Image (cartoon, helix red, strand yellow):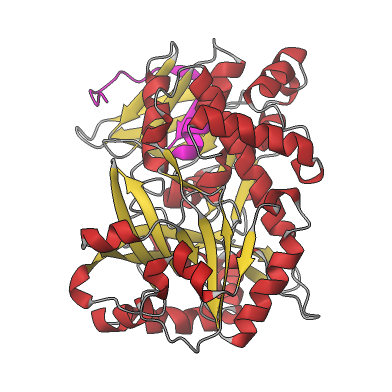
């Protein structure tokens, strides 16, 4: 991908801040809806998709709610709430449809570069957890999304599914597992770079690498002046646009705070970093083929749900365990230690204080995680891989996540563990805050953004027809139509080269 310095256009229809999966998705959708639209993308690094979208930085690839237990909480009356799981599963199907459209158009030439079939499993032990997983399975089976889910407490079957997890395990320990054959592994870094590479070839699209966005000010005419700086030659520049999307990962909060819109008030952010244990023993790597999620430690953030995870990264099979939580005041992996203190403003100080007071277990959890030694982490790994040896695993730094803090009338301030779209009243500025499930729901997030930011165009027959072509089922409720869902999955499996 070319990284030559490109001239800054004085004006463009759209500015996308950050060359991650969100900006790549929105840019591709807009160019399909309007081939004449002009777009400038500003990326502070030299390569697209290497921060939150990067494979080594992404805490969960292919989130579809098949195995993530935090998406199906148990309520006070003992019942399982599956509403979030159903919503995320549906949104992931929209992403698959959109990627299939790009493959059909030959914008993505080889799906195997970014997606592969990988079973998604949940695994628990202990009577209480087994009971929970059984209830979860019974509740999920009522939804067409999870109809093909398998459940067992039979150790022989589980051993056949995940021999690495069962080898050396106490034979008297109660265990249970669910398995979804429709699971996938997605390398969002590779997907992002392929999409950005295609966008670069389109007329009217310019990607500026090593250029960071500094500020955005209203131009008095309904648009925005965007101020940027080239990190190689330190030169500053300005461009004008009628629409700005801030999809800069951890840097989004800073840029949103600089936008003069009322919707920015009250938002803050709390950074949580991550660490992986990466397997270095090829024999062990090849013995495991699944994404196996367990139950999170009490007080831990959802992004820290432990999992033993098979992944394809740059054409090589990898095996990761984690993530373990860490703490840094940086908002980006390549950010500044001053990111957190600089984000504290008069309008978000009270929400941040109250959010901190209401989340003392999280603080305690982070302190405990920071004190872990390699042996401590191996001990945690042995709950999933009983025969794990310290020399077979190395510690890698994962990405930074900035959890959303926002005002709340009742609580004063709350910490959100999802993603949130902030859109100005006139629709000329949009920003995506938060983390999980993030990348997996990019298509749904950007399609939902369109009628808020391109109100007139979204109502036209031309746009409506094109949207149906890109994501045919977006206007339907897949959660209520099993026949349509089956048709969608069969089609996307074929186009994406996945197991059927």
One can see residue 442 in this view: yes
Estimate the x, y position of residue 212 in percent, counting from the top left.
35, 38
Quarter of the picture containing the N terminus is: top left
Quarter of the picture containing the C terminus is: top right
Q: Is residue 16 magenta?
A: yes
Q: Is residue 129 magenta?
A: no
Q: Residue at x 76, y 16 (%)?
A: 460
Highlighted magenta segment, given as a residue range: 1-26
Estimate the x, y position of residue 282 in percent, counting from the top left.
22, 58
Q: Residue at x 78, y 57 (%)?
A: 142
Q: Residue at x 67, y 66 (%)?
A: 72
Classify residue 159 by image quadrant: bottom left
Q: Is residue 13 left or right of residue 272?
A: right
- Which is more toward the observer, 255 or 3? 3
One can see residue 345 in this view: no
Q: Is residue 374 left or right of residue 181?
A: left
Estimate the x, y position of residue 426 in percent, counting from the top left.
70, 33
- Which is more toward the observer, 319 or 447? 319
Q: Is residue 378 above or below residue 207?
A: below
Estimate the x, y position of residue 42 in percent, counting from the top left.
38, 32
């Amino acid at each position: 991908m070319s990284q030559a310095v490109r001239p800054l256009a004085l004006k463009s229809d759209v500015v996308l801040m950050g060359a991650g999966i969100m900006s790549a998705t929105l840019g591709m959708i807009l160019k399909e809806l309007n081939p004449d639209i002009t777009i400038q993308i500003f990326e502070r690094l030299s390569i697209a998709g290497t921060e939150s979208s990067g494979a080594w930085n992404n805490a969960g690839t292919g989130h579809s709610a098949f195995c993530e237990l935090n998406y199906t909480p148990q309520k006070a009356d003992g019942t399982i709430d599956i509403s979030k799981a159903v919503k995320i599963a549906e949104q992931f199907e929209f992403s698959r449809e959109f990627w299939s459209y790009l493959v059909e158009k030959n914008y993505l030439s080889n799906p195997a570069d970014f997606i592969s079939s990988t079973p998604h499993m949940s695994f628990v032990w202990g009577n209480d957890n087994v009971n929970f997983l059984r209830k979860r399975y019974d509740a999920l089976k009522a939804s067409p999304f999870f109809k093909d889910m398998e459940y067992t407490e039979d150790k022989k079957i589980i051993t056949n599914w995940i021999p690495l997890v069962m080898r050396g395990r106490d034979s008297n320990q109660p265990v249970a597992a669910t398995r979804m054959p429709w699971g996938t592994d997605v390398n969002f870094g590779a997907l992002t770079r392929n999409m950005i590479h295609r966008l670069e070839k389109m007329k009217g699209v310019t990607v500026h690498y090593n250029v960071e966005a500094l500020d955005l000010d209203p131009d008095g005419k309904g648009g925005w002046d965007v101020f940027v700086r080239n990190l190689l030659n330190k030169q500053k520049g300005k461009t004008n646009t009628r629409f700005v999307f801030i999809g800069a990962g951890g840097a989004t909060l800073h840029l949103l705070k600089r936008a003069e819109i009322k919707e920015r008030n009250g938002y803050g952010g709390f950074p949580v970093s991550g660490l992986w244990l990466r397997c270095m023993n090829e024999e062990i790597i090849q013995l495991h083929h699944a994404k196996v999620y367990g139950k999170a430690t009490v007080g831990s953030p959802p992004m820290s749900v432990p999992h033993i995870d098979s992944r394809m990264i740059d054409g090589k099979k990898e095996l990761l365990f984690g993530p373990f939580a860490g703490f840094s005041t940086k908002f980006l992996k390549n950010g500044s230690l001053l990111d957190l203190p600089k984000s504290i403003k008069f309008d978000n100080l009270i929400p941040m204080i109250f959010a901190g007071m209401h989340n003392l277990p999280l603080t305690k959890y982070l302190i405990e995680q920071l004190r872990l030694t390699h042996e401590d982490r191996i001990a945690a790994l042995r709950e999933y891989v009983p025969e794990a040896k310290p020399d077979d695993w190395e510690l890698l730094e994962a990405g930074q996540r900035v959890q959303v803090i926002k005002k709340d009338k009742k609580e004063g301030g709350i910490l959100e563990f999802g993603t949130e779209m902030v859109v100005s009243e006139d629709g000329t500025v949009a920003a995506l805050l938060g983390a999980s499930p993030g990348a997996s729901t990019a298509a749904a997030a950007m399609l939902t953004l369109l009628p808020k930011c391109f109100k007139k165009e979204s109502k036209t027959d031309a746009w409506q027809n094109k949207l149906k072509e890109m994501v045919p089922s977006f206007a339907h409720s897949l959660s209520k139509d099993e026949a349509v869902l089956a048709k969608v999955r069969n089609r996307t499996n074929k186009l994406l080269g996945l197991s059927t």
